[in-house]
Image (spheres, grey):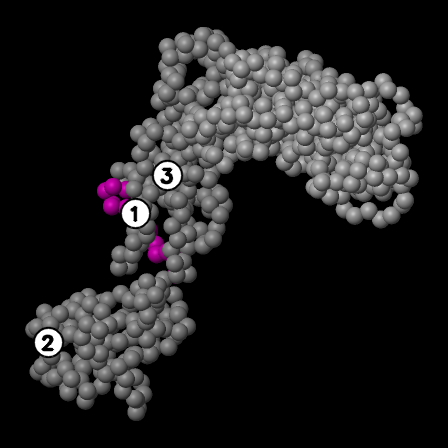
Amino acid sequence: MSDRSREQAEAAVASNADLKGSTSLIEALRARVASLAASGVDVAQLPPEQALQRIVRSHATTEAEIRFRLTPATRRFAADLARAVAAFSESNSLSQAAAESEPSQTSTSVRTPQPGARAQNQPRIGEGEAEEARPDAEVIVDVHEPTGPLAERSDLPFARFAFAAQDTPASRLRFGFDTEGRLLLAWDEQAGSDVVIYRVIARDDRAPHSPDAGETVAVTRGANVVDERPFSRAVRYIQVWAHRGRTRDEALASQPTLHASDSVVTHPTGVEIREDNGRVIGQWDSLDGASAVHVYRVPAQRAQFERLAAQHRILEGSANRSGFVDTGVERGGEYLYQVRTQCDVDGHTRLSDPVDVELRLSQVLRRVSDLSVVADKEVEGDVVLSWTPPPGGTVWIYRTPHPPAEGSDNAEVHVTSLTQMNLSDDSRLRQNPERDTQTGRAVMRGVSRPHDWTRTYFTPVTVQGERAFIGAHVSHVFVEGIANAKLVERVDKEVLTFDWPAGVSVVRIYQAPKGTPPEQATQQRPEAEVAQDAYLASGGYVFNRPLPVRGCDVFIVPVSFQAGRQVEGKPRVVTQEWLARMRYAVKLETNVLRRVTGATVTVVADDPIKTAPDFVLVYNPDRLPLHVEDGRAVMMVRADEEAPTPSRTIRFGAIGPQPAPSWRAHPGTWKNEIGDRPTGYLRMFANVPPELQRHLAVMDPAVDRLALGRGGR
């Protein structure tokens, strides 16, 4: 049979096989995808129609083979599709149909390699979508079949390569390894009706500079081959050259173009990973060209989602070309170890697919004897637990209002007997502890207490299977924080009020300049230590002396007692802003009939004030004025000036402990605006914006000093 006849016959058989599969198996696969969509799976996440057709054309039957024909995003459905293929095969004799559709081979047409045959659960085709060409395409020559050297093939008269600059390859080379270690290669076919012959060339030392400068892996009309040759170095350079023509002979005689190209890094060989008395030892062989081997230790429970995750890489500071020793494992732990070769290729770092080894370490259980409980500095009312993790087992922490049953410390019991030790399942904390990288201790944060508990017991229990080892329990007094704290100005004194915390014996009060850190402020002697009875009797804590004019921070520290020692709660700080305190005096002027004909005012301040605020003397004929606009502003003049200018604004300038120059009511205006028989009250106010009023304390004299007549008495 001629080459052309053989090609036409095999193409017809392959086409017929695809047709048979499409009319039956494709429907079974579509039905399985539809059932997955009906079960709630997002349709956009399911394998598309194109992927189902690839499965039918390739006659893939096993889960591994089907995974090879799916994109990375849809490979998790390989098992479902494999079950659909198996069910269809049982009811419709799929295997016989597949056998009938196998294309015939001749002495010059060697077997058709299947890129996905017996593929592992993670073969990758390049770094993108696992799109492959027809797996049943004719292979003109596979040089690894026992048919003699390529030089003896008289039917392959390729034209001698004429060196010329090559364009960027039109296709991306996709590759992966099957379970037998064979290299699977695939690329996109060139479009058009011309005959295209692909020459697959490889070298292990450098990239070939022409199709004649490397070892020929295969010559094929299809878009995929299998390279079974062992690697001699860690990197293999693969090139696919395309010969194109209207006929086969014209294609062989044409100048080739570089159709696809890439480098493949192989993983270490002879990988052995085992436990050695609580540590893990790995050994393997690395080929020349490998700069390092990456090692990953993934906890088994996270392996499904965190394979090759950067946070699980270990021993990054070592090359690990021949193995490793891992001392950071936990006894009884189960891990997935992954090792992959790193190579420097053309100035870029390339990594191989990993070799996976699952390992479960033996366990040695120990009780937790150093449980520590301290107050959380960031979250008021919470505590932080820490302990040294035992070499094996899982540590459960119980939180109870009472200690465990007497004699339970250091006891070994069945897990079902923990309830009898006052350690119920409801009292077990569910937070996941962290590992302190500096101390190696397990740390559990964010542990709170039930609202009505003032004392809590924490008990560690090491669990392995059905065995439970109860460690030493630790009690902790929760010192409730200070709430609703505020400073209240009451005429000439300050009062500190707050909600008294439950279970607190005394409260210490400290005073320090504004901005002082709490740990520094509470190191000095407290201003007062207040008991609950005294606090309730006074309605708060009354400061013995006025707080500083420039302001200060007041720290409130709750204190409780446990086993004869003091336990302090988190300090609460209340800031007293600056406050200028002033007192004024009013001297009423009367005539012989004892009628008020005027008034003189002056002001003093305990602490000097360089620039005093403006003041206004307000008159109200009916009652004591309540604010600066609650009445008439009295026209005033400086008492020490010979020709003063009347003004309703009083400006004292600087004031201090000595009385400032006084101001008196303007006689003429007084008689016209207030009258010669006034009643009511006078009162002086600081005339400042509202935002400054809270910083000024203007203290009134006795009320009878402000009354003008019978109406005000």
Q: Give the number of the mark in front: 2 or 1.
A: 1
**N-terminal label among 2 and 3:** 3
Q: CA distance from mark 1 to mark 3?
A: 14 Å
The magenta segment: 535-549
Q: Residues within 10 Å of mark 2 (few under 14, many from 20)?
A: many
Do callouts 1 and 3 mark residues in contact (Cβ within 8 Å)?
A: no
Q: Is residue 689 visible?
A: yes
- Quadrant of the frame with the N terminus: top right
Q: Is residue 540 magenta?
A: yes
Furthest residue in direction bottom, as rendered: 643
Callout 3: helix, strand or loop? loop
**N-terminal label among 2 and 1:** 1
Mark on residue 252?
Answer: none
Is 611 situated above or below 10?
below
Q: Which residue is mark 1?
A: 497
Q: Which residue is mark 2?
A: 679
Q: Residues within 10 Å of mark 3 (few under 14, many from 20)?
A: many
Callout 2: helix, strand or loop? loop
